[in-house]
Image (cartoon, rainbow, N blue to C red):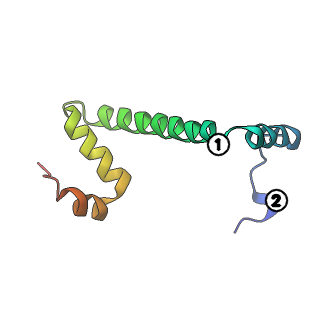
């Protein structure tokens, strides 16, 4: 566990964090869920872009499988989809 002196300084002031919490408190649940899904999709696009950069000759299906293996972990991926060819 980090000691208080070794923790990084927060980049958000207490006032800004309080305002942010108030905005989220007032936000409709459907909007909160929409933000979660949008954030997830953004992260997925970033991840697949990185995979595509490291595997420039892979097709869309191969990129998806590489992403799914990384996202789920090898054991869960193998249980769900079977072992992927390593050729």
Within 10 Å of disc 2 (Cα), the crowding (few <14, some 14-19, many 20+) is few
Q: Determine whether 79 is above or below 13 in the image.
A: below
Picture residue at 72% right of the left edge, 65% below the top:
2
Residue where numbered disc 1 is placed: 29
Q: Position of residue 23 (x, y in %)?
A: 77, 37
Picture residue at 14% right of the left edge, 52% below the top:
86
- Tell me the quarter of the image containing the N terminus: bottom right
Picture residue at 34% right of the left edge, 51% below the top:
70
The mark that comes first in sequence, 2 or 1, is 2
Q: Position of residue 19 (x, y in %)?
A: 83, 37
Q: Secondary structure at mark 1?
A: helix
Task: Kindly give the residue lying farthest to the right in the view shown.
Answer: 15
Q: Which mark is residue 83?
A: none
Q: Position of residue 9 (x, y in %)?
A: 78, 47
Question: Residue 20 versus residue 85: which sits nearer the camera?
Answer: 20
Q: Are marks 2 and 1 in contact (CB under 8 Å)?
A: no
Q: Secondary structure at mark 2?
A: helix
Q: Determine whether 6 is above or below 9 in the image.
A: below
The quadrant holding residue 58 is: top left
Image-based side of 15 in relation to 85, left or right: right
Image-based side of 21 in relation to 46, left or right: right
Residue where numbered disc 2 is placed: 5
Image-based side of 55 in relation to 40, left or right: left
Task: Kindly give the residue lying farthest to the bottom in the view shown.
Answer: 1
The quadrant holding residue 48 is: top left
Residue at mark 2 to residue at mark 1: CA–CA distance: 37 Å
Image-based side of 49 in relation to 7, left or right: left
The quadrant holding residue 13 is: top right
Front position among marks 2 and 1: 1
Q: Position of residue 6 (x, y in %)?
A: 76, 58
Within 10 Å of disc 1 (Cα), the crowding (few <14, some 14-19, many 20+) is few
């Amino acid at each position: 566990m980090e000691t208080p002196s070794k923790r990084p300084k927060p980049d958000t002031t207490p006032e800004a964090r309080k305002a942010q919490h108030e905005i989220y408190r007032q936000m409709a649940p459907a909007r909160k869920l929409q933000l979660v899904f949008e954030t997830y999709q953004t992260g997925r696009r970033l991840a697949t872009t990185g995979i595509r950069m490291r595997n420039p000759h892979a097709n869309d299906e191969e990129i998806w499988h590489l992403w799914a293996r990384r996202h789920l972990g090898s054991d869960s991926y193998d249980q769900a989809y079977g072992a992927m060819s390593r050729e």
